[in-house]
Image (cartoon, helix red, strand yellow):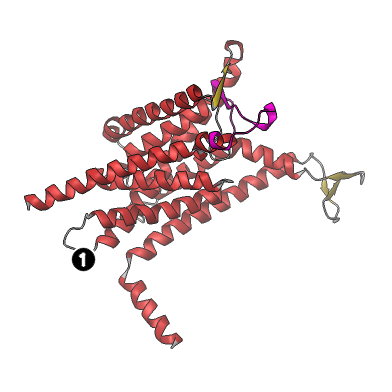
Amino acid sequence: MFLQLLAAADRLWQKQSWLPLAISMAAIYAAWTSLFRLLILTFVTFFLLPPGFVPTGGPGFWASRDSRPIALPKFEEITDILSANELPLLGFSALLFVSLLRWLHPLTSTTTEQIITSSRVRERFMPGFVHGATFAIGIILGFLISGSYQYLGLYLQFDELALALPSILLRIAAILAFVYSEEFLFRRRLLEHFRMGLAAGKADQANLRSDVLAAAFTGVFYCAIKVLQFDLGVMQLLTLFLLSLVLGIQSSRSGDFARGAGFWAALLMIFHVLFSLPILGTDFSGILMVKYQASADDGVAVNETTRLLSGGAGGPLSSVALQILLLIELGRTLLRRRKYFRSSSSSR
């Protein structure tokens, strides 16, 4: 009985040849991310050690040449350094992964034209960026007007511009590289595998059902990678899954990932760099200082409804209000997609 089930599973696996490709790609990127984080952790630990010290053989201690024992760097110190630089490092990791896919061509099917072109940036990425920036600013203004967030002033001072500007530019470049590279991986390569596999053998190879299922499967893998990369809560994962659904269906409709990449990059930049709000469990002091008002540090009683709507200390990615807006956008996208298929069917 077991052998029969195993044979049936093997036949199904062989029949769905697109599924191993999709899973393999996600697994390779997950392994790449894990190894990169481990490498960074090794370097951080090494550079925190005082020079000239060697292990004594005892647990948790090193010694100098005069046998004076020294404690290893504290776990909190290593965690703080990693958390402060996590987003730039992961942005570089994603960019390097996509670059390797391109450099390995023709061993891989990735070409430069698939990743980036001037027309793609001009006609799709930039309009998506403007849409995302408008969307994000509207959300923050709504939170400020409702009293959920408090504006604390301009954080970036003119006399500190020379010191702070490189950090801000690095953060912007990291977000651009991180979002654009991962959108190519998930909303171009992985989504394409799922979509074509689910639609194979059907009369309409671009049907709505396969688009939604492909976007949902891609969203599951996307959230799994995000759990591996960051320390995220349930609310942030829900927001990321809804966002992945919206961007996935829109990418299926347009046949390109760049517009969604622009929207997502603008959202993170406005939240994180412009308003200094936490994203993906990462804090950063940007240009303007906006903070969640009802925090325990201020001695203010926390209103649960306000915390849920605004995201609280977790930032806007934990916000129920943002999730509701994404649900509305998802509904609009599905309606437009359904009208498209109906008009296509009637014309045939």
Taking the view exactly as shown, the residue that stands out farthest to the bottom is 1
* Residue 312 position within the rendered picture, expressed as x and y whole percent measured from the top left: 57, 35
Judging depth in this view, the residue of 209 and 115 nearest the camera is 209
Left or right side of 265 for 72 = right
What's the residue at 47%, 30% (across, down)?
269
Left or right side of 326 for 232 = right
> Does residue 158 show up magenta in the picture?
no
Q: Is residue 179 above or below residue 205?
A: above
> Does residue 301 show up magenta in the picture?
yes
What's the residue at 7%, 49% (across, down)?
347
* Residue 257 position within the rendered picture, expressed as x and y whole percent measured from the top left: 32, 42
What's the residue type where badge 1 is placed?
A: Gly
Q: Is residue 108 visible?
A: yes
Q: Is residue 115 visible?
A: no
The magenta segment: 283-306
- Give the residue number, with chain letter if any, for mark 1: 201
Give the position of the N terminus as an image quadrant: bottom left
Mark 1 surroundings within 10 Å by alpha-carbon count, few (fewer than 14), some (14 through 19), many (20 or more): few
Judging depth in this view, the residue of 66 and 332 nearest the camera is 332
* Residue 213 position within the rendered picture, expressed as x and y whole percent measured from the top left: 33, 57
* Residue 65 position within the rendered picture, expressed as x and y whole percent measured from the top left: 88, 44
What's the residue at 32%, 67% (across, down)?
17
In terms of image quadrants, where is residue 240? top left
Left or right side of 16 for 182 = right
In terms of image quadrants, where is residue 51? top right
